[in-house]
Amino acid sequence: MTLKPGAGLLFDIDGTLVESDPLHLEAFNRAFAPYGHHFDRERFGRELQGLANEAIGAQFLPHETPERQWEIMMEKEALFRSLAAEGVEPVHGLFALLDWADAIGLPAVAVTNAPRDNAEQLLDSIGARHRFKGLVIGDELEFGKPHPLPYLEGLRILGADSQNCVAFEDSRTGLKSATSAGIATIGMATGLELAQLLEAGATLAARDYTDPHMLAFIAERVGASEALGA
């Protein structure tokens, strides 16, 4: 099968590959309770979801030194990894999509603001690390999401053309990053609602990877002759 030149798929991890947002919410509430913060699902999606740790620490812990802010954020991440070690699930339909991509020679990369330890643990937990050509960590770059740099780095790893790629995101921060890099982006409604994802810039929004409109769009965008499940 001949795909469009530079075709590829770019995936966020938390809430996009893996159903992990409820664990992040619990970890944030445990870590931030001593500082007077409590987050429900709506506030999590509005104020925390997808943001880099440095930005979260500066916003919610302004009376702490930058060094202490970072320590608290790393305590939160350790709590998250402990919770995630009990088991996480991939978003429904993910592996069928990855199998289809492998079968037609369509490469994929993971792009996240999560620390490397988190990202690798989650990918390993669902047995998916080997399915990706690379792993982009926002904190290891000059700028993380919502800056486009993480997705531009993902495109570089793939040797891809943004016009022939599709990205997948579940947060406003991630959507801004991917769309600012010129990539058509599908919003995954694992946390935000479909309408909220579209308002935030998603080209399409879907609840999981079995959505037929989403699958048809991916095939058209990358130049596949047949969509998954067609």
Image (tube, helix red, strand yellow):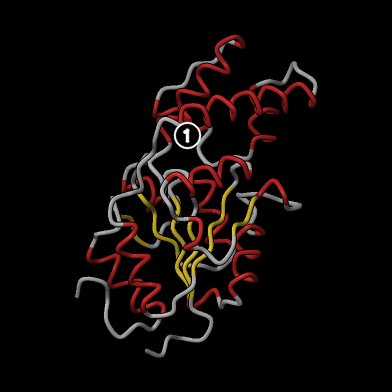
Could you say where residue 42 lies in the image, as x and y percent from the top left? Answer: 40, 29
Query: How many numbered tags mark residues here?
Result: 1
Q: Nearer the viewer, residue 61 or 73?
A: 73
The N terminus - image quarter: bottom left
Q: Residue at x 53, y 81 (%)?
A: 6
Residue nearer the viewer, 168 or 86: 86
Mark 1 secondary-structure assignment: helix
- Taking the spot 39% from the left edge, 35% from the top edge, the residue there is 87
Q: Residue at x 69, y 46 (%)?
A: 139
* Outermost bottom residue: 2
- The residue wearing badge 1 is 46
Relative height, residue 153 to residue 158 (above, below)? above
Could you tell me residue 159's position as x and y percent? 61, 77
| Left or right: 10 in relation to 141 | left
Three-letter amino acid code at disc 1? Arg
Question: Residue 143: image x %, image y %?
Answer: 71, 51
When the figure is inspected, residue 102 is found, relative to residue 146, above or below; the finding is below
Relative side of 1 to 34, left or right: left
- In the rendered view of the protein, which quadrant contains the C terminus? bottom left
Position of residue 64 in the picture relative to residue 40 (left or right): right
Quadrant housing residue 72: top right
